[in-house]
Image (cartoon, helix red, strand yellow):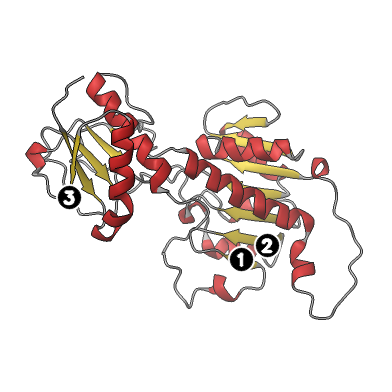
Amino acid sequence: MSTSPVKALFAAKPERWTAWEAPLRRAFDEAGLTVDLSRDHAPDQTDYIVYAPNGPVADFTPFTRAKAVLSLWAGVEGIVGNPTLTQPLARMVDEGLRQGMVEWVTGHVLRHHLGMDAHIVNPDRTWINEPPPLAQSRTVTILGLGELGAACAEALVALRFNVFGWSRSPKAHPGITCLSGAGGLDQALAQAEILVLLLPLTPATDTLLDAARLARLPNGATILNPGRGALIDDDALLAALDRNIAHATLDVFRTEPLPQDHPFWAHPRVTVTPHIASETRPATASRVIAENIRRGEAGEPFLHLVDRSAGY
């Protein structure tokens, strides 16, 4: 491994530098790396781009020396189709993201499973003495069995929920009924008393939950979307809330922040959370960036490389 400094360009919004600089430098030190981290490296002198899709870099053509683009975000739909990107692209997968998503998903699954809203908001002081079923009598379906979806599914299995999972390609996870393909999607939806969307956004998943697929959900189903806003047809969801959907808890939207006049804000059976289900946390994510730079300098395969033909 070279002992000369490698040059890492921090290509995120300038206001993020304060939060990221110290954790990244600490992670580089812990990994035994000599890294010149800066926001100002010339493109032709940059070895690695520490990247956020809303940052200053959109044209990767000048980065002729860059060995990899290391994203700080889990989602890559904003970059994967960029024709100037010829360098390897790694998405962010780290323990902080995983744990944050598991906590949000299990918290809201339990909220709806237990019927907590009726007790928290009870202005009439009604004595609601109706215990919920036990977890093993409730089916939760997770669309998407990648890093985050699989982690959430495993946590729900540990709580003894009946868990179905769907993915584009066949997968196998202990304790989870794994389905795939178009026929498997119909079956997964038909079972879903609580549906969790954790798919990446690709041309194949854009508006996946349209009117026809929403109609396949059981009467009284609940939808949780911490994945991507464009997975759902907003108008179709609003119509389904008057038909077969009991509640939708949404953390992601087609336009963010969600416009104040959007119907979701005022709908009595919609909960809006402001894209907080899982956030990249510098303390843990910096170690992933450092490990990928270590791998790049050692000639080892990068972690979490994006398959650009698949879109994630």
Residue to which mark 2 is pinned: 247
- Could you say where residue 229 lies in the image, as x and y percent from the top left? 48, 56
Q: What residue is drawn where x is 75% and y is 69%?
A: 120
Residue to which mark 3 is pinned: 39
Quadrant assignment, res 23: top left
Q: Quadrant of the C terminus?
A: top left
Q: Which mark is residue 271?
A: 1
Query: Given the image, on which type of amino acid does mark 1 rest?
Result: Thr
- The answer to whether residue 227 is left or right of residue 194 is left
First of labels 3, 1 by sequence position: 3
Query: Given the image, on which type of amino acid does mark 3 rest?
Result: Arg
First of labels 3, 2 by sequence position: 3
Q: Secondary structure at mark 2?
A: strand
Q: Residue furthest bottom?
A: 124
Q: Are there few (<14), some (14-19), or many (20+) residues within 10 Å of tag 3? A: some
Q: Secondary structure at mark 3?
A: loop
Q: Are there few (<14), some (14-19), or many (20+) residues within 10 Å of tag 1? A: some
Q: Is residue 294 above or below residue 207?
A: above
Is any part of residue 164 visible from this angle?
Answer: yes
First of labels 2, 1 by sequence position: 2
Query: Given the image, on which type of amino acid does mark 2 rest?
Result: His
Is any part of residue 202 visible from this angle?
Answer: no
Quadrant assignment, res 269: bottom right
- Could you say where residue 224 lies in the image, as x and y percent from the top left? 61, 54
